[in-house]
Image (cartoon, grey):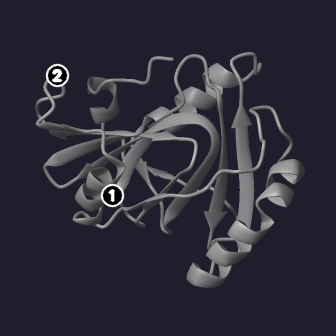
Amino acid sequence: MSRLRVYAQNEPGRPLDTLLDHAMIAHALDEVGVRFERWEAAQPIEPGATQDEVIAAYASDIDRLKQEKGYRAVDVISLTADHPQKDALRQKFLSEHAHSEDEVRFFVAGQGQFTLHIGERVYDVLCEKGDLIGVPDGTRHWFDMGPNPHFVAIRLFTNTEGWVATFTGDDIAARFPRLQN
């Protein structure tokens, strides 16, 4: 089940609000400029699927997003708990960073936790199969796949180089709850 927890940036141990209703989560995130939608993840994709398999299965959704927002590059991140580089990949995404373009993810299997640092608030979003999240360019955030990752996400970019991050150097991500799976 998708979940949003909202924290004051200086109180990581106590959420100000917790939302479990998808429409309420979408509304709360929309108020801070974050796209959050429920899509049909109908194709049978499991973590470990190849990039080509995932892109072929969701070609029509990918094409629609490309036309809608001008995305020029797409890739797939697919991880399971037995991936030999899971710990290094988890660490890479756990530090607060931002991008010069929107970060869009459509989860077609499993789950992952996006945590957004917007103003004086921290928005902790648990994304599940069928969730599409669009984090606006320049938004400080981090991503946690948990110690035992199990997810497949399609990533879309306007930059043909793909995922390019600017790390903030702030240790805020270490103070907030991590995904435990």
Residue beneath disc 2: 13
- Number of numbered discs: 2
Does 42 sit left or right of 94 as displayed? right
Which residue is more in the foreground, 104 or 54?
Answer: 54
- Whole-angstrom CA distance, mark 2 to mark 1, is 23 Å
- The tag on residue 126 is none
Picture residue at 68% right of the left edge, 18% below the top: 81
Residue shown at 58% from the left, 42% from the top: 129
The residue drawn where x is 23% and y is 56% is: 28
| Residue type at the position of mark 2 | Gly
Q: Residues within 10 Å of mark 2 (few under 14, many from 20)?
A: few
- Of the numbered discs 2 and 1, the one sitting upstream in the chain is 2
Residue 126 vs 69, above or below: the answer is above
SS state under label 2: loop
What residue is disc 1 on? Answer: 26
Q: In what element is the residue under mark 1? A: helix
